[in-house]
Image (tube, rainbow, N blue to C red):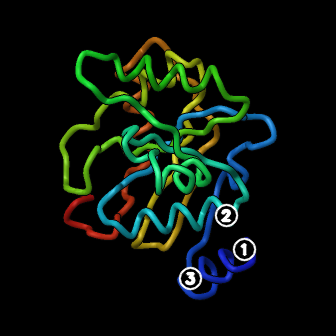
Amino acid sequence: MRWLAKFIYFKLLGWKVTGNTTFSKDTIKKAVIIALPHTSWHDFYIGILLRKVVNVKTNFVGKKELFKWPFGYYFRAVGGAALDRTSGQNKVQAIAKLFENKDEFRLTLAPEGTRKKVEKWKTGFYYIAKEAQVPIIMFTLDFANKQNHISEPFYPTDDFEADLKFMKAFYKGVIGKKPEYS
């Protein structure tokens, strides 16, 4: 199936991948991966194709109800992990705990939390990475240039503002599928 993903990604869609094209998969078994800008449902299949193209297993979290029959098997097979989203729980700690129980876990998130334009990112991804003591790997969903650019692993420091500024600079000038939401 990897050859099919490459054919679709490179030949049919005309995309390219640059930067840390292996996601440092041989040395980084656990990471929080952030994808921006998240402006359209098209981002999902680009991400699915990208993970096949670079041959790196990535994961996501979803509400625990999604992991029941009949879809549970499928969601787990494609890298999903169930999350109990009932109120009163610390979601950052619950997600960070998922890293403890797995030998390999690369959690992909969209910091905007929506496909609409936002002024501020949600910061849970940052605190998950800090709590789980894993790096953040950034990648772009640059529809203007048909490119996914992937960063080297970035380890959060104790200076949230400086770290956020550094990460936002990585995405400067990147245009999503819907430019008005970028």
Amino acid identity at mark 3? Gly
Residue position for label 3: 14
Asked whether the residues under the numbered discs 3 and 2 touch, taking CB atoms below 8 Å apart as contact, a structural biologist would say: no
Tell me the element at label 1: loop
| Disc 2 versus disc 1: nearer the observer | 1
Question: Of residues 66 and 102, which is closer to you in this image?
Answer: 66
Asked whether the residues under the numbered discs 2 and 1 touch, taking CB atoms below 8 Å apart as contact, a structural biologist would say: yes
| Disc 1 versus disc 3: nearer the observer | 1
Q: Quadrant of the C terminus?
A: bottom left
| Disc 3 versus disc 2: nearer the observer | 2
Answer above or below: position of 14 versus 131.
Answer: below
Q: Who comes first in sequence, dot 2 or dot 1?
A: 1
12 relative to 69 in the view: left or right: right
Point out residue 21 in the picture as x, y percentages from the top left corner: 69, 55
Q: Residue at x 70, y 35 (%)?
A: 104
The residue carrying pointer 3 sits among few (fewer than 14), some (14 to 19) or many (20 or more) residues within 10 Å by Cα, namely few
Tell me the element at label 2: helix
Point out residue 14 in the picture as x, y percentages from the top left corner: 56, 82
Which picture quadrant has residue 149? bottom right
The residue carrying pointer 2 sits among few (fewer than 14), some (14 to 19) or many (20 or more) residues within 10 Å by Cα, namely some
Marks 3 and 2, how far apart at CA: 16 Å
Residue 1 — which label? 1
Amino acid identity at mark 2? Lys
Q: Residue at x 44, y 21 (%)?
A: 94
17 relative to 29 in the view: left or right: left
181 relative to 40 in the view: left or right: left
Residue position for label 2: 52
Q: Quadrant of the N terminus?
A: bottom right
Point out residue 163 in the picture as x, y percentages from the top left corner: 43, 26
